[in-house]
């Protein structure tokens, strides 16, 4: 059975996937990716009103979006995975501006509802969990949620074809005496489907103290495939989107 975003939330409740990833998430999130995605948001979302962030995880970019909103803006943070939602709410509860601005929704992206037209829908690190059939519903739903001129924003996916990705180490951060990194690889498990195997490692100096692995089945979505799907629901590519960012503007009814 293909895993979906809702399926990943269920797996996390059983101690798999994001249940393993969650305790490490902020320490292993690649700094270069954090910086590039933050800069993309600053360019595309500054001054926005209503924004939906789908799959915010622990709130790494929810906090950035809060800084970028216009004076009457609000955020709908849609996070179905309980362990991630716990971290998200904890982060937001410490930010005074979030109290009247951020609404956390526990539904998945195909079920959550917002009742205002959106200036932007942000989907970082999550669309790979949806099958082609589910993406048809996903794009249509959120394209309709945008007001004319609103943006759908995500990153280009890696890899662009269903090919194995050899093991590589992604450096992470440190907490006190420990440093963290991720050993990542991907195996081909089906047509346009790969399985990422992520091993989260805790080090004290050069001594490996602990490692925990999680697997995620991910649909491969090339930029060309994405363009065809988004064009079909009335979206048009943003002409000045930063490199590596897929930003699509609503120009007609889905």
Image (spheres, rainbow, N blue to C red):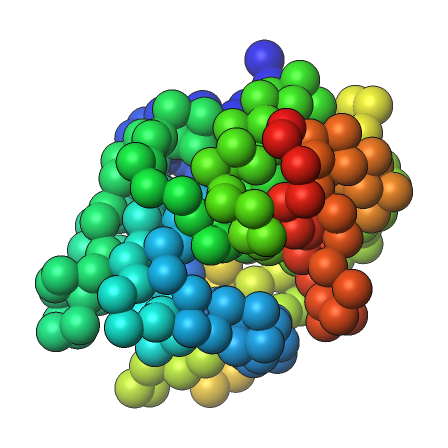
Answer with left or right where residue 215 lies relative to residue 188: left
Q: Quadrant of residue 91?
A: bottom left
x then y, percent, for residue 104: 24, 46
Can you say which quadrant of the picture contains the N terminus?
Answer: top right
Question: Which residue is at a point 32% across and 36% down the rendered structure image?
Answer: 114
Comparing 175 with 120, the one in front is 120
Number of dots carrying numbers: 0
Comparing 134 with 212, the one in front is 134
Question: Which residue is at a point 62% across and 60% down the rendered structure image?
Answer: 183
**Residue 214 shows in this picture:** no
Furthest residue to the top? 1
Comparing 129 with 208, the one in front is 129
x then y, percent, for residue 31: 55, 78
Can you say which quadrant of the picture contains the C terminus?
Answer: top right
x then y, percent, for residue 194: 73, 35
Question: Which residue is at a point 49% across and 54% down the rendered structure image?
Answer: 120
- In the image, is residue 51 above or below residue 34? above
**Residue 52 shows in this picture:** yes
Question: Which residue is at a point 77% across and 37% down the rendered structure image?
Answer: 231
Q: Quadrant of residue 39?
A: bottom right
x then y, percent, for residue 161: 87, 41
């Amino acid at each position: 059975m293909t895993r979906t975003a809702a399926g990943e939330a269920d797996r996390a409740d059983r101690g798999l996937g994001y249940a393993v990833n969650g305790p490490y998430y902020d320490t292993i999130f690649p700094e270069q990716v954090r910086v590039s995605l933050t800069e993309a948001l600053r360019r595309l979302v500054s001054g926005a009103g209503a924004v939906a962030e789908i799959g915010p995880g622990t709130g790494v970019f929810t906090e950035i979006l809060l800084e970028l909103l216009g004076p009457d803006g609000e955020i709908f943070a849609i996070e179905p995975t309980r362990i991630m939602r716990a971290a998200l709410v904890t982060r937001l509860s410490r930010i005074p501006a979030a109290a009247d601005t951020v609404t956390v929704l526990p539904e998945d992206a195909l079920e959550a509802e917002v009742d205002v037209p959106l200036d932007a829908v942000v989907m970082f690190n999550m669309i790979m969990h949806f099958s082609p059939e589910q993406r048809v519903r996903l794009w249509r739903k959120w394209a309709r949620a945008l007001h004319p001129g609103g943006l759908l924003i995500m990153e280009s996916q890696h890899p662009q074809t269903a090919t194995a990705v050899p093991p590589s180490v992604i450096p992470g951060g440190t907490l006190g005496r420990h440093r963290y990194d991720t050993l990542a690889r991907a195996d081909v498990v089906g047509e346009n489907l790969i399985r990422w195997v992520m091993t989260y490692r805790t080090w004290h100096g050069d001594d490996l103290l602990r490692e925990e692995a999680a697997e995620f089945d991910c649909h491969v979505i090339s930029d060309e495939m994405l363009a065809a799907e988004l064009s079909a629901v009335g979206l048009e590519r943003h002409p000045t989107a930063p490199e590596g960012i897929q930003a699509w503007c609503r120009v007609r009814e889905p």
